[in-house]
Image (cartoon, rainbow, N blue to C red):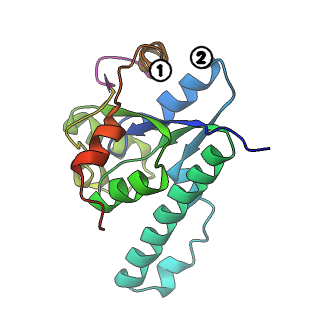
Amino acid sequence: MTASLGRVVLLNGPSSSGKTSIGEAMLPLLDDPWFLVPVDGISGMRSTVYRRSLSDHEIAAMMRRTRTGYHRAVAALVHAGNDVIMDYPLSEPWRLTDLLNVLEGVDVTLVHVRADLHELERREDARGDRPAGLARNQQVFDHGVCDIEVDTMHQSAEQCAAFIVEGLVSLSTPKAFDRLRTSVTRTD
């Protein structure tokens, strides 16, 4: 018996924009069972000994492998028929091109999660679990098209979650990911 494909809601925004809080607030609002799969959850499973023993180049390669594995873990869940909320910044071009490939044929709703840079830096500093400047470095995440946009400067995570869940039923097609497939060169 072949399972039908699950769906993906991709919460795309820089560090400290509120993606995880929105994803958590969405779970009780969705009718079907959904998985919240944040990239930080995958990264958190890795040992931290590497910080003492790997060069910057080796760390960069490990991080790319981690993110590539994250893409494939989400794809595996979706191909088994599960619905997934991804909490993930599309802050490097290859991330988008790889996801366009591994999520080919999947119903993906791309949500941009926004907040002012000064607010992101304030949140990042208050959290204390992020390297300084991470939010600033992840500002290049907007690929010019999305299905839904929320602003966590003016709305709570719960308000953003409700807006997204309500919007899921009335989105027009083709969705952003489908439009991106026709405009992004997928050679990376």
Q: Residue furthest front?
A: 1
Counting from the top left corner in percent of width and height, residue 41 is at 58, 52
The stretch drawn in magenta includes residue 151: yes
Kindly indicate whether the residue at mark 2 contacts the one at mark 1 (C-beta within 8 angstroms).
yes
Where disc 2 sits, the SS reads: helix
Give residue 115's position: percent from left, percent from top.
Answer: 27, 31
| N-terminal-most mark, 1 or 2 | 2
Horizontal side, residue 65 vs residue 130: left or right: right
Residue drawn 57% across the image and 50% down it: 74
Q: Which residues are magenta?
A: 148-157
Q: Quadrant of residue 109?
A: top left
Taking 26 as reference, is 146 left or right?
Answer: left
Q: Nearer the viewer, residue 110 or 22?
A: 110
10 Å crowding of disc 2: few (<14), some (14-19), many (20+): some
User: Pointer 2: what residue?
Assistant: 29
Image quarter of the N terminus = top right
Name the residue type under label 1: Ala
Q: In the rendering, which numbered label is found on residue 161?
A: 1
Q: Which sits in the foreground, 75 or 114?
A: 75
